[in-house]
Image: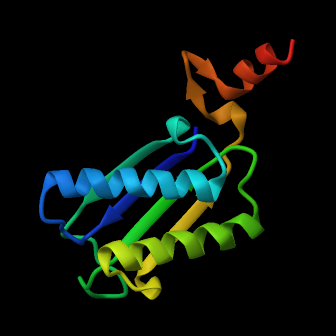
Amino acid sequence: MPLIWVTTNVKLESDEAFKAFVQEFMQLAAETIGKDPFAFHINCQYNPFLIAKGSFEPAVMVQTMSLSNTTPENSIVWTKAFSDFFQEKLGVPPERSIMAFMDPGPDFIGMKGTTAAVLRASASK
């Protein structure tokens, strides 16, 4: 169920190129975070108005929510992997990428008409 929002001011050459970028990022995120790629929801957007450090130079802003494995140690690993990917694929240097990692807890993630906490409790019976 990881939820990831990526915003960048780097325009790719076509919608197809952007879709390929998102799919490749999903695979990297799944490997890095350690969850099934089919569990991910990723919203990747181009925003020419994204400003970072006072300029419109290439930049990326990422927010990631993942249950049960968001730790300070994983945040370091995930930041490195994502930064390297964005530098390679978008030309965004690590100092122009900002990321936030959160575990909202299963009571605050809704899916299948209920919450992750209810689904987990049902599965453990």
Q: Position of residue 49 (x, y in %)?
A: 21, 70
5 with respect to 112 (left or right): left
Within the image, what quadrant is residue 123 found in? Answer: top right
Q: Position of residue 88 (x, y in %)?
A: 38, 78
70 with respect to 52 (left or right): right
Within the image, what quadrant is residue 14 found in? Answer: bottom left
> How many discs appear?
0
Q: Position of residue 44 (x, y in %)?
A: 33, 53
Display coloring: rainbow
Query: 89 or 43, which lies in front?
Result: 89
11 with respect to 79 (left or right): left
Query: 95 or 86, which lies in front?
Result: 86
Quadrant showing the N terminus: top right
45 with respect to 1 (left or right): left
Query: 64 or 40, which lies in front?
Result: 40
Q: Position of residue 33 (x, y in %)?
A: 63, 55
| Residue found farthest to the left | 14
Quadrant showing the C terminus: top right
* Residue 119 in view here: yes
Residue at image position (54%, 15%) is 113
| Residue found farthest to the right | 125
